[in-house]
Amino acid sequence: MKQLIDISKELFESKQVGYIIGYAEDKFKRVKPFVAYSSLDTERFVFNNNSVNNLAVYLTRLPKAKEGKIGIVAKGCDIKSIIALIQENQIKRDDVIIIGVNCNSVVNQIDEQFSKENTAIKCKYCQVRTPAHYDYLVGEIKEVELPEDKNFAIMQKLDSMSAEEKWNFWEAEFEKCVKCYACRQVCPLCYCEQCIVDKSMPRWIDSSATTKGNFAWNMIRAFHLSGRCIGCNECERACPAEIPLSLLNRKMGMVAINEFNYRHGTDINQPTLIGNYNVNDKEDFIM
Amino acid sequence: MENEKFEPKIVAFVCNWCTYTGADLAGTSRLKQQTNARLIRVPCTGRIDPVFIIKAFEKGADGVLVSGCHPNDCHYNTGNFHARRRWIFFRQLLDFVGIDSSRLYFSWVSASEGKKWVDVVDGVINSVREKGPFNGYKKLNKEIEIPVK
Amino acid sequence: MNTYVLSKDHLKNLALELINTGYKVISPSKDGRRFVAISSADDLVINSNLKPSSVSMKEFFFPKTETLFFYKRNKDEYDLIDAAEVNQPQIIFGAKPCDTSAIPIVSKVFNWDYKDEFFNKKVENTIIVGLACKFADENCFCTSVGLSPVSEKGSDLFMIPLTENTYACKVISEKGKKFVSNHSKIFTETIDGKSININEIKIPEKRFESKEVKAWLDKNFNHKLWDKLGENCLGCAQCAFVCPTCHCFDIVDEECNHTCGRRAKNWDACQFEIFTKHASGHNPRNEQDKRYRQRISHKFKYYTEKFDEILCTGCGRCTRGCPVLTDIGIILEDINQLAKESISNN
């Protein structure tokens, strides 16, 4: 990780950045987000298979740097969400310095040892192990063993179910939701100043964690991310109730690809899908 | 109760400038239509947040109709184009969580299409009547209803 | 009070009998991730080596959403209708000392000036069978908050593994004694409570002195440590919602239709931005560092001052589930270190 630390130091010494968001280990060798404010702090930077957090979430949460830009250490998938934020005009490209990292897949369950079985499913289809967009690039690509895509079978099974069976499947899942909104808070693209569930006049989504209120919340969360989610799966990882939120996101991502051939967060200059329209959009469902 | 004939409840979100005026025309023209649909007037189809549709189903609607100006006729130029793109996603999301998206109907009805409005509404009501009641939320609502002793 | 010997078969038979007599039998799920009501005695999980479940068992006393009463419009007036009384007896198996001890701790706040009948009724109807804990990882710190893997606090009956298939079952409370006498067919073989060997159970080392932590908190409402903590925290409330002792709630009115509705008590958490937001728009805890300070201070200072209890059982759930791995144990160790430094500086 000398490369990463050297570049970070250089950025501080040339006064290009105010702070750098990266990963560091705590005393139990667990990797967690860490903000470095000086070149001394950067000594703590690490990157390995446990660097699972999507740090792009901090770009809209932390205050702007007093001087200089914001540096961020990011994997290929995290860079997609940085690009998405730029596409959606939440940050400016000139305000961030992206230190891209060649990623050799990340852990699924953070409290267990990294292994092939314990690799995040998103890594299976990763196209950006070497990031597609960056200012600096560090790390080396190694051969990795890819995990099994357990969700694919579930998706197929869901597609073959009747409406009632699907409803029962999701009823059992959403029943567990406790409305802690961790899914919202860890999402780099959930940056609204005030979330629709926090609005009480009128109250559109019940604040009670009844199954009915949970249905409304989880559907609206998925809808607000449709055509926008870049699939980092932080929501599912953060969920204490272990609801398979990635299935919803994946379905919406497939709609974006199938209907519009669109992938969010791949091109800085591409207009966003949901914020725009085309007069020739399909309307075979409209009478 | 069980022997009673099922009469569907339909909520129709209609835009102020086209469909609502079209429905008004149907009324002033004395055209006959079934009365199961409750109209909710909104400024534009672009104003219809999908959460409105979820709320309608929550509150016991068996079907929802969304109707507005034809493409290129929008009072605000592009409202219905934006809305259309959202619906493409929303319909598939409903299907995925188990709310049959064929209970959600869309139409373009202009201010001069009183006759089309009557046909659309009658068509929707008949089709929902055939499908029967939407029971998903009825069960969930029990959680917050006054228990029957 | 007596101590009995129970085998796994005894426990299964007991669970079966209880299910058949209308008890809600609660045990850790097969994967140990949560507590669930079981419908078959085969689903009973008794395992001292299990990691604490990811969600605590508080929902069986303090549900995530609970109806207080219903209202119905009657011309120009409103009729209030009581929520259906829950009288189903419950029994919880396999609860660790860090789960069981939470009940007497939060009971104090639910019985302070207003007696919360909803909570009390459920506690009254519940038999808690504690289980000595053989699990300890870097997130656990029960010994630092005055508990231990063999604390009997909050249990009605307490089990300690003797061999692979047998447990010593101590009777702790009067409620437990009554329960045992009602099921005397199963509780037959007794053993001398003093002869049980608990040396096999590893007692984790103390990580910090809660008294010193409190003394530091008394003096350092403003400290740069809080800024640092607020920076990483994303402000989700996962920590509060999985915590066995967090008990904040919100009261909302929810309409069912235009003529009726209900008033409900829902889980709430101090990590939410809107938790302290005033109607005027002013928010006294407008930044995450202030909200994180509140979390620590409530647990280790305010609650201790008011009720002489630490509002934490050291189970480590908040750390295990935290998306950014904010470790409350390490924070408390750091505070303890700061406290020691400030003492030696004076």
Image (cartoon, rainbow, N blue to C red):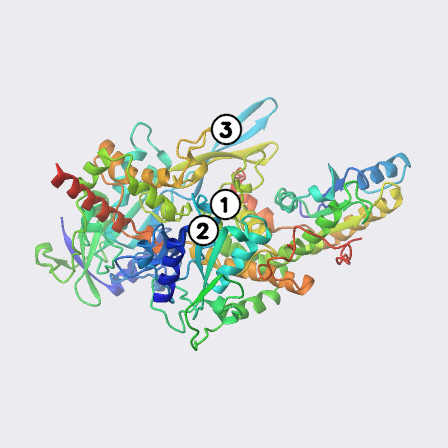
Residue in view at x 35 percent, y 34 percent:
C117
Residue A144: image location, x then y, percent: 43, 76
Secondary structure under tag 2 reads strand
Q: Amino acid at mark 1?
A: Thr
Of tags 3 and 1, the one toward the viewer is 1
Percent x, y of residue C131: 23, 56
Badge number at residue A70: 2
* Mark 2 neighbour class, 10 Å CA radius: few under 14, some 14 to 19, many 20 or more: many
Identify the image quadrant of residue C175.
top left
Q: Secondary structure at mark 3?
A: strand
Query: Closer to the camera: disc 2 or disc 3?
Result: 2
Label 2 to label 3, Cα distance in Å?
A: 56 Å
Q: Which mark's residue is nearer the viewer, 2 or 1? A: 2
Seen as rendered, the residue at the extreme front is A14
Q: Secondary structure at mark 1?
A: loop
Disc 3: which residue: C80
Which residue is tagged 1?
A210
| Mark 3 neighbour class, 10 Å CA radius: few under 14, some 14 to 19, many 20 or more | some
On the same chain, marks 2 and 1? The answer is yes
For the question of whether residue C20 can be seen, the reply is no
| Residue type indicated by callout 2 | Ile
**Few, some or many residues within 10 Å of mark 1 (<14, 14–19, 20+):** many
Q: Residue furthest right?
A: B29
Q: Amino acid at mark 3?
A: Leu
Left-right relation of A70 to C295: right
Q: Residue furthest top?
A: C76
Q: CA distance from mark 3 to mark 1?
A: 21 Å
